[in-house]
Image (cartoon, rainbow, N blue to C red):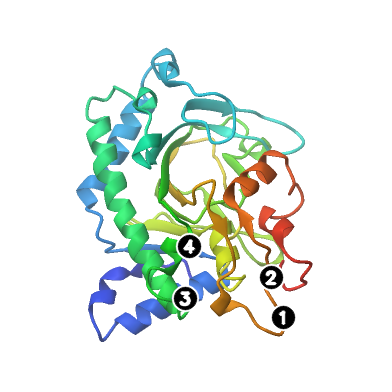
Amino acid sequence: MATLKPIDLSGLHDERLASSVRAQIAEACETNGFFQVINHGVPVELMDKLKEVGRKFFDLPKHEKLVYAGKPVLGAEGYGSRMVLTDSEPQFWREFVELHTLPLSERHYNYWPQQPAEFHETMEKYTAAVLDLAHRLLSVISENLGLKPTYLKEAMGETQQSTVFQCYPPCPEPGKTLGLPAHSDIGGITILMQEGDGLQVAAANDTWELVPNHPNAFVVNLADQIEIITNGRYKSANHRAIVNSDSTRRSYVTFYYPAKDQKIIPAPELVDAKVGPLYRELYYLEYLQALEAGRAKDKRLVQSFAINNPLVT
């Protein structure tokens, strides 16, 4: 597995270091699609402010948070809470609020908390800054593949963005649940800021590796649509969140994903003429429908879109 030591993006602006930084990103993308970045251009003060408004929101009385409750369906906006202990299959132990931010027509302010008072302004500034980071990373990743800098951004169509605030309270029996069960992200690219350790990524021999909580770093992971577009060259990876009995962990996750009517196809430049594409063409809506239908209980969902190819695992 590639190291999860943070990659210093400031090196991209230094011709003596740029090739090394690009190589580190390429190695992470080829290995499991997970890496961390520092000196990424998002102001630390803005990161701290988002954490602050997140903590203040989760500290509100339950009845005040329920004002923003969303419907219990996939992709729904708003506040939710699910804490389940079980002796069988691991369930959930978290509360969260999910907000769509792009396109602007999908920004439903009735789900945006009014308290703390600075929530709206902070969210708008933060998501704009992280969007810029996502575009810069997609540019580097595209060029690493020998594609034009805008390829991956254009392949996903109109930018769709949502941010999820997640809170994992202390659990009395952490061995009986998970903050979030194992999954791979279904969209394009995910940028996560965490407070406290608890994020794990799948490693060799059915083991899990902890993603360390580095100050002022973002965790970046590629999602399933990037694996399809890169024809399996770059991977999405299963990951999960664990909980503990002593402390609260929070994370702030921003997702970038295609529009529902966007056609996703492997980049022709990355398809071996002798082997052919590893994945079939699809519309992103079809992928969402497959997720809702539970088509991938025992494997990654992206595998169900493979063209009967043993190279896809």
Three-letter amino acid code of the residue under disc 2: Leu
Residue corresponding to mark 1:
275
Q: Is residue 43 left or right of residue 81?
A: left
Q: Earlier in the sequence, mark 2 or mark 3?
A: 3
Three-letter amino acid code of the residue under disc 3: Ala
x%, y% of residue 278?
A: 69, 70
Q: Earlier in the sequence, mark 1 or mark 4?
A: 4
Q: Earlier in the sequence, mark 2 or mark 4?
A: 4
Residue corresponding to mark 2:
278
Mark sitting on residue 26? 3
Q: Does residue 195 show up? A: no
How far, Cα to Cα, is label 2 from label 3? 20 Å
Q: Is residue 224 left or right of residue 112?
A: right
Residue at the spot x=28%, y=36% of the render?
52
x%, y% of residue 54?
A: 34, 34
Question: Few, some or many C-alpha atoms within 10 Å of disc 4 (few <14, some 14-19, many ≥20)?
Answer: some
x%, y% of residue 289?
A: 66, 42
